[in-house]
Image (tube, grey):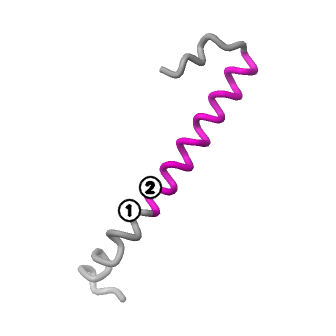
Amino acid sequence: MFGIENLSGNSQAAALVGIVLVEAMVLYVGYGALESVVGPTVLKLLGGD
Protein backbone atom coordinates (compact mmCIF):
# COMPACT_ATOMS: atom_id res chain seq x y z
CA MET A 1 0.00 0.00 0.00
CA PHE A 2 2.80 2.42 0.84
CA GLY A 3 5.39 0.84 -1.45
CA ILE A 4 7.72 -0.11 1.41
CA GLU A 5 8.17 -3.62 0.02
CA ASN A 6 10.71 -2.15 -2.43
CA LEU A 7 13.01 -0.97 0.38
CA SER A 8 15.91 -2.94 1.83
CA GLY A 9 15.59 -4.75 5.17
CA ASN A 10 16.63 -2.00 7.58
CA SER A 11 14.88 0.73 5.61
CA GLN A 12 11.72 -1.33 5.43
CA ALA A 13 11.76 -1.91 9.17
CA ALA A 14 12.32 1.79 9.90
CA ALA A 15 9.51 2.80 7.54
CA LEU A 16 7.14 0.30 9.13
CA VAL A 17 7.96 1.55 12.63
CA GLY A 18 7.39 5.12 11.47
CA ILE A 19 4.04 4.24 9.91
CA VAL A 20 2.91 2.48 13.09
CA LEU A 21 3.96 5.44 15.25
CA VAL A 22 2.09 7.92 13.05
CA GLU A 23 -0.99 5.70 13.13
CA ALA A 24 -0.79 5.50 16.92
CA MET A 25 -0.56 9.29 17.22
CA VAL A 26 -3.54 9.80 14.90
CA LEU A 27 -5.63 7.32 16.90
CA TYR A 28 -4.57 8.92 20.20
CA VAL A 29 -5.62 12.39 19.04
CA GLY A 30 -8.81 11.08 17.42
CA TYR A 31 -9.96 9.14 20.45
CA GLY A 32 -9.08 12.09 22.70
CA ALA A 33 -11.23 14.41 20.60
CA LEU A 34 -14.07 11.88 20.54
CA GLU A 35 -13.89 11.47 24.31
CA SER A 36 -13.99 15.22 24.89
CA VAL A 37 -17.07 15.56 22.66
CA VAL A 38 -19.02 12.48 23.79
CA GLY A 39 -17.67 12.05 27.32
CA PRO A 40 -19.84 14.61 29.14
CA THR A 41 -23.01 13.23 27.54
CA VAL A 42 -22.14 9.67 28.55
CA LEU A 43 -21.36 10.78 32.11
CA LYS A 44 -24.70 12.58 32.29
CA LEU A 45 -26.54 9.50 31.09
CA LEU A 46 -24.76 7.30 33.61
CA GLY A 47 -25.47 9.71 36.49
CA GLY A 48 -21.88 10.80 37.03
CA ASP A 49 -20.54 14.30 37.56
- At numbered mark 2, what does the secondary structure look like: helix, strand or loop? helix
Name, please, the residue furthest toward the right.
Answer: 10
Q: From the viewer's perspective, is 26 left or right of 8?
A: left
Label 2 sits on residue: 30
Q: Residue at x 48, y 20 (%)?
A: 1
Label 1 sits on residue: 34
Name, please, the residue furthest toward the top.
Answer: 6
Q: Main secondary structure of the magenta part?
A: helix
Q: From the viewer's perspective, is 44 left or right of 27?
A: left
* Residue 36 percent location from the top left of the image: 40, 70
Residue contact between numbered discs 2 and 1, judged by CB atoms under 8 Å: yes
Cα distance between the residues tagged 2 and 1: 6 Å
Q: Is residue 21 magenta?
A: yes
Mark 2 surroundings: few (<14), some (14-19) or many (≥20) residues within 10 A: few
Vertical arrangement, residue 1 with respect to residue 31, above or below: above
Q: Is residue 4 magenta?
A: no
Rendered image quadrant of residue 47: bottom left
Q: Residue at x 51, y 55 (%)?
A: 28
| Residue type at tag 2 | Gly
Vertical arrangement, residue 5 with respect to residue 30, above or below: above
> Looking at the rendered structure, which numbered label has been put on residue 11?
none
Q: Residue at x 48, y 50 (%)?
A: 27
Q: How many marks?
A: 2
Vertical arrangement, residue 17 with respect to residue 6, above or below: below
Q: Residue at x 27, y 80 (%)?
A: 46
| Residue type at tag 1 | Leu
Question: Which region shows up in magenta?
Answer: 9-32
* Residue 30 percent location from the top left of the image: 44, 55
Q: From the viewer's perspective, is 7 left or right of 23?
A: right
